[in-house]
Image: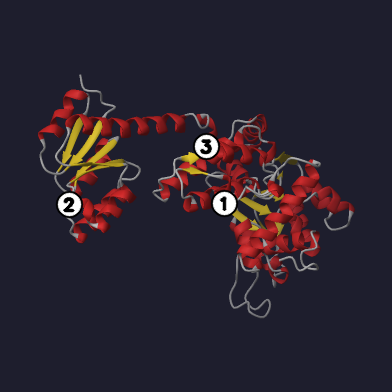
Amino acid sequence: MVDEGKRLLYTGADFPEVSGLSSYAWHIYQADSVADTLALHKNVSPDVGLIYLDTTDQTTLDQWEECLVACHPLRWVALVTPEFLQCRECAEFIYKYFEDYHTLPIDEERLRNTLGHVHGMVRLKQTLSQQDVEPGKKSYQMFGQSPQMNELFRAIEKVARVDSPVLLNGESGTGKELVARALHYHSLRSNGPFVAVNCGALPENLVQSELFGHEKGAFTGAVSRKMGKIEAASGGTVFLDEVGDLPYEAQANLLRFLQEGTIERIGNNATTSVDVRVLAATHVDLESAVEQGRFREDLFYRLNVLRLNLPPLREREGDIELLANRFFSIFAEKNSSKVKGFSKQAIKLMKHHAWPGNVRELINRVQRAVIMAESRLITPQDLGLDKDHNSRAGGSLHDVRHHAEKQVIIDTLSSANNNVSEASRILGISRVTLYRLMNKYDLVRNRLF
């Protein structure tokens, strides 16, 4: 009986040895052209592809290249003549797009072993991918198995269908917008719009206009009527990220909206009713901001009806390696990388890194490592984790985190050639937030950037 799990997509000349694979539990689907190959890949979902490449014509190879990209993530083996490999462009083509190759004449046993090895690696990867997360967690587009994340998943389920405001508290890079989107898409407002606003990135003179809208001619440059972000979210959810960065005057207008459910566009005294759920997020301590007079106490209580605390990555026991492997799989496939994974030392240092940038920093480091790695396994050097200052060892957690956060800012500014806008984009924070952190660590005064 044929094992339906061993599906081979074959395209090329007829070789008896290939047809003979059917007696070794291979189900063979043969294509005669690029179009047939694409159609079979779509309909059959094969595990391994086998191509006989009998020409060095660049136009033909370009067509096959487009086909291989379209058939991603199918793993391929090439059948070639020894002469084919003498062509440098052809050899590079094999190296870039194929798991292995088999030179003619066909050695049936060697071909079976080659295909069997590739098929085994495909199945192993499928098994590992299925073990990454529990099925129910995927709906949030967040991944983790730590007690902290399981608690967060349970809290999202409880809070999602309640229409009250929610305050999301967590460090930069912990995934506050992902949580906000999960709350929206699992709420009764899921058919309505979801509008995200980065309050820290809004120019101070345009905050009111961006949030509440304006009428034509309300101020210089107001050449037409504009709907504000809050009104645009009517019937759905508005997510106010970095709400702690709002100017004090804008805080008063936001409070009025939360109290009355109405807004006033700039240049119009008439009120407009808006039905929208408000989710807000901050990485700063709003209670301290209230005590210091930087944030309105009455607004804080309006926003803090329900509260979710997002755990930093360094406290998510067991999730660092899980997330690193998941992001590695994504970037390795996207870049057709030959890198196979992380070295043991890389995993060890990742587990001991303070991760001041949290999941966003992990994503950036893994993506860079996949592109830059020169060996089969990613090393600490590829991740940029070979420096002692990145370790969590030594000192209090507060001191280690602040030291690491400062160093990441210095390194990022340096890599961005001191361009604050580019550095803030890399770090995933607003320029206002980055300037505040630079002042916090005396980087401006000490000219360390």
Residue beneath the point at 52% across and 45% down:
191
Counting from the top left corner in percent of width and height, residue 59 is at 20, 61
The residue that mark 3 highlights is 139
Q: Which residue is mark 2?
A: 83
Of the residues tagged 1 and 3, which is closer to the observer?
1
User: In the rendered structure, which amino acid carries the disc numbered 2?
Assistant: Glu
Q: CA distance from mark 1 to mark 3?
A: 23 Å
Judging from the image, what secondary structure is the residue with disc 2 in?
Answer: loop
What is the quadrant of the C terminus in the image? bottom right
Q: Residue furthest top?
A: 1
Q: Nearer the viewer, residue 193 or 45?
A: 45
Distance of label 3 from label 2 (alpha carbons): 51 Å
Give the crowd class for mark 1: few <14, some 14-19, many >=20 residues within 10 Å.
Answer: some
Q: Is residue 105 visible?
A: yes
In the drawing, does residue 84 fall left or right of residue 257? left
What is the count of numbered marks?
Answer: 3
Left of 251 or right of it: where is 410?
left
User: Disc 3, disc 2: CB below 8 Å?
Assistant: no
Inspect this view and state whether residue 143 appears.
Answer: no
